[in-house]
Structures are given as C-alpha cells and as structure tokens.
Image (cartoon, rainbow, N blue to C red):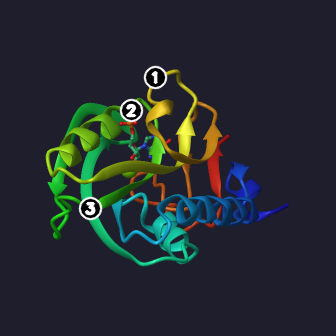
Amino acid sequence: MCRAMQKGLDILVTAAEIQKRIEEMAGKIAEDYKNRPLVVVGVLKGSFIFMADLVRQISMPLTCDFLRVASYEHDHPTGVVRMEFDMTQPVTGKDVLLVEDIVDTGNTLRALLNHMELKKPATLKVCSLLYKEVGSGVREKIDYLGFTVPPRYVIGYGLDSEGLYRSLPYVAAFK
Ligand code: IMP
Ligand code: MG
C-alpha cells in the first residue's frame, strides 16, 4: 500500500502530472509575453511551491513578488478576504501575472483582482494551479489553469489543512 493510501488520501493529481502541466503552462506564458518583462506575483502561502516550479520553467526575464491574503479558517471560507501583507514593488504600467494555488468560491480572486487593478498594471492575468468545480462563475477570470478538481477539500503541493500537508508532492483529498 502506498503512503497516501495509508494516510487515507485519494491522490487527485500526481507529482508527474503536475510537472508535465507546469511545463506546458510555462511554455504558453513565455510565448504569450514574448520577452516583455513580467512581474509574477504569488499569493501566499498556498502558491509558493507551484510558483517556484512554474517560474523555473518560464524562459524569459521576470521578477517575483508576493502578497498574502487569508480567507479560510479551520478549512472553511470565512467570507471575508483579509490582506495580511502587500507586495513590495510598484507594478504601475507593468505586465503582472497573479499566481494562485486554487480558486474555489472565487471570493479571494475577485478581491485580489480589485486590489491589483488599483495599482494600474499595464496588463493583469491570472494563473491558478487548480480550479474547484463549483460553478462560481470565475473560471473565465483564470487565464492559465492547471487542473480542475472536484468540490472536495484538497491538500498537498502547497495547499494545507490547518497548516499541514503543504509539502506533499501531489494534490490529494481526504477519503
Ligand atoms: P475562494 O476564495 O473560495 O476561491 O478560495 C480561495 C483560497 O482559499 C485559496 O487561495 C486557498 O488558499 C483556499 N482554499 C480554497 N479551497 C481550498 C482547498 O480545497 N484546500 C486548501 N485551500 C483551499
Ligand atoms: Mg490561496
């Protein structure tokens, strides 16, 4: 029995599938921006592993920044999106790619897009590793999407449950 099964997990996306998809997404991003300098902005904490793998596959000049929002408590959305810290470099007139781990209800993404628009970037696009199929009507706001997952609470590859499981190399759900 593999370790994930011992832990009572269903693996939804394997480590190999994630890496293959990241290569495809990074290739498309490099092609779309055609060497225009890009600011890649990761939404902490969930996106840190995805972003680290993604930027290393994007073969063009880019800078990285981060911001942190919190919208979940005890694995459930609070309905309030709290900005815990903001990015450090100005992005006015720049091409910005926002990197998220997962879009569920879309509340966080909507709040982030409003927040980023105020900074007047030249362009603003969204890259998310996962999209949870809930019919929240924000799928069209994701320009680069890794995988669609069923409406279950998922962990691994940066995503946590009460702070744990971020370091798993795959995306899984509890049985
Ligand atoms: P939304 O605002 O409902 O779209 O949720 C977005 C944020 O909540 C994501 O950036 C995650 O940090 C967190 N989140 C949503 N669903 C999950 C999940 O299934 N596992 C872990 N974190 C999640
Ligand atoms: Mg997040």
Position of 127 with respect to 70 (left or right) is right
**Front residue of 114 and 173:** 114
Residue 29 appears in the picture as rendered: yes
Residue 97 to residue 35: above or below: above
Tell which tag, 3 or 2, sits nearer the viewer.
Answer: 3
Position of 165 with respect to 125 (left or right) is right
Q: CA distance from mark 3 to mark 2?
A: 24 Å
Q: Amino acid at mark 2?
A: Gly
For residue 81, what is the image quadrant?
Answer: top left
* Chain-order first, disc 3 or disc 2: 3
Instruction: Kindly indicate whether the residue at mark 2 contacts the one at mark 3 (C-beta within 8 angstroms).
Output: no
* Mark 3 surroundings within 10 Å by alpha-carbon count, few (fewer than 14), some (14 through 19), many (20 or more): some
For residue 93, what is the image quadrant?
Answer: bottom left
**Front residue of 78 and 4:** 78
Callout 1 secondary element = loop
Which residue is denoted by mark 1 in the rendering? 137
Which residue is denoted by mark 3 in the rendering? 94
Instruction: Kindly indicate whether the residue at mark 1 contacts the one at mark 3 (C-beta within 8 angstroms).
Output: no
Callout 3 secondary element = loop
Cβ at disc 2 under 8 Å from ligand 1: yes
Instruction: Kindly indicate whether the residue at mark 1 contacts the one at mark 2 (C-beta within 8 angstroms).
Output: yes
Residue 154 to residue 43: above or below: above
Residue 19 drawn at (x, y percent): 68, 66
Instruction: Give the residue drawn at x 17%, y 55%.
Output: 84
Residue 116 drawn at (x, y percent): 22, 48
Q: Quadrant of the C terminus?
A: top right
Instruction: Give the residue drawn at x 33%, y 49%.
Output: 124
Q: CA distance from mark 3 to mark 1?
A: 27 Å
Position of 33 with respect to 110 (left or right) is right
Q: Amino acid at mark 1?
A: Gly
Q: CA distance from mark 2 to mark 1?
A: 8 Å
